[in-house]
Amino acid sequence: MRWQGRRESENVEDRRGMSTGGQVAMGGGILGVIILVLQLFMNNGDTSNLQMPDLQQTTPSAGSTLSPEEEAEDNARASFVKVVLADTEEVWTKLFARSGAQYQAPVLVLFRDAVESACGRASSSSGPFYCPADNKLYIDLSFYQELQTRFRAPGDFAMAYVVAHEVGHHIQNLMGTSEKVQRMRGRVSQEEYNQYSVRLELQADFYAGVWAHHAQQITTADGRSIIEADDIDEALRAANAIGDDRLQKEAQGYSVPETFTHGTSAQRMFWFKKGFLTGDIKQGDTFNASTLE
Ligand SMILES: [Zn+2]
């Protein structure tokens, strides 16, 4: 992706240097209680699974002991995700305006090790996630490394896909889709709920594809598309790497389809690709699709 020197989003809270333990945690106590009460109020007491964790991280992030080289790399990755976020703002603002709506951009929170969100406390091990209760995306940049090493999905656009997927959850939040799915929790069996979850996740993949489609029109100062030849393959490789079937097979040697919450590798690639090829939000009704791939 051609991203260097391009506009970075300002909708970013950089909490990388912040401690989440000790005094900060104590200071956050009262606020934390207020948030929890608000959450209970808003969700009729159900605080389970408010956040949308997408990938479990295995390696702990480097934490506060970064060498100067690691720090420089971390900062470059921060710049990269801020540029991607700015590109999602540009595309979604345009698409919302087409239907006469105004796009409310989400905030990206960069953190290291652990973070407090309106959906609860999360550690890097829960991977990037979106919290519908505060309209924020949470990313520990060490996940970038995780994509390359554990998931063998190298290339900057693998990470751009992850950011665009989380923004996809924000779109679902704005459209009321996430709330509809959340309301099914407890009303249907866990197995059925998982199916709703899969459709929600595949739609976020579809929205990531829709974004990539329109991002092709964004150009650099010298007039070239920001999307490079290998970018879409990088995204597809990432989507392939994080399918439930593949992750379960890797972890336990077999997969259990009833427990899938994000979709298979084939489904994730299919919906990203469909979004990329059509660029049309209306084509992404995963909830009424007769087949998911
Ligand atoms: Zn997701």
Image (cartoon, rainbow, N blue to C red):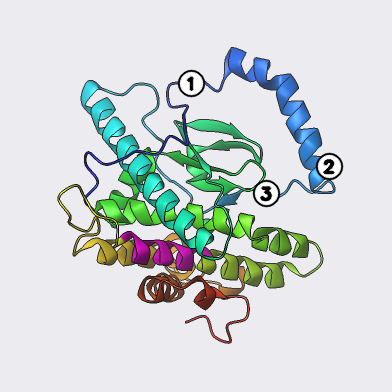
* Type of amino acid at the residue the image marks with label 1: Met
Q: CA distance from mark 1 to mark 2?
A: 29 Å
Q: Secondary structure at mark 2?
A: helix
Q: Residues within 10 Å of mark 3 (few under 14, many from 20)?
A: some
How far is the residue under mark 2 from the one under mark 3?
13 Å
Residue 50 percent coordinates (x, y)? 67, 49
Point out the residue furthest to the bottom here. Answer: 290
Mark 3, residue position? 50
Lower position in the chain sequence, tag 1 or tag 2:
1
For marks 2 and 3 on the same chain, the one whose residue lies earlier in the sequence: 2
How would you rate the neighbour count of disc 2 (Cα within 10 Å): few for under 14, some for 14-19, many for 20 or more?
few
The mark total stands at 3
User: Real-space Cα distance between discs 1 and 3?
Assistant: 24 Å
The residue positioned 72% from the left and 63% from the top of the image is 180
**Residue range (magenta):** 204-215
Foreground tag (1 vs 2): 2
Quadrant of the image occupied by residue 192: bottom right
Residue matched to label 1: 18
Residue labelled with disc 2: 41
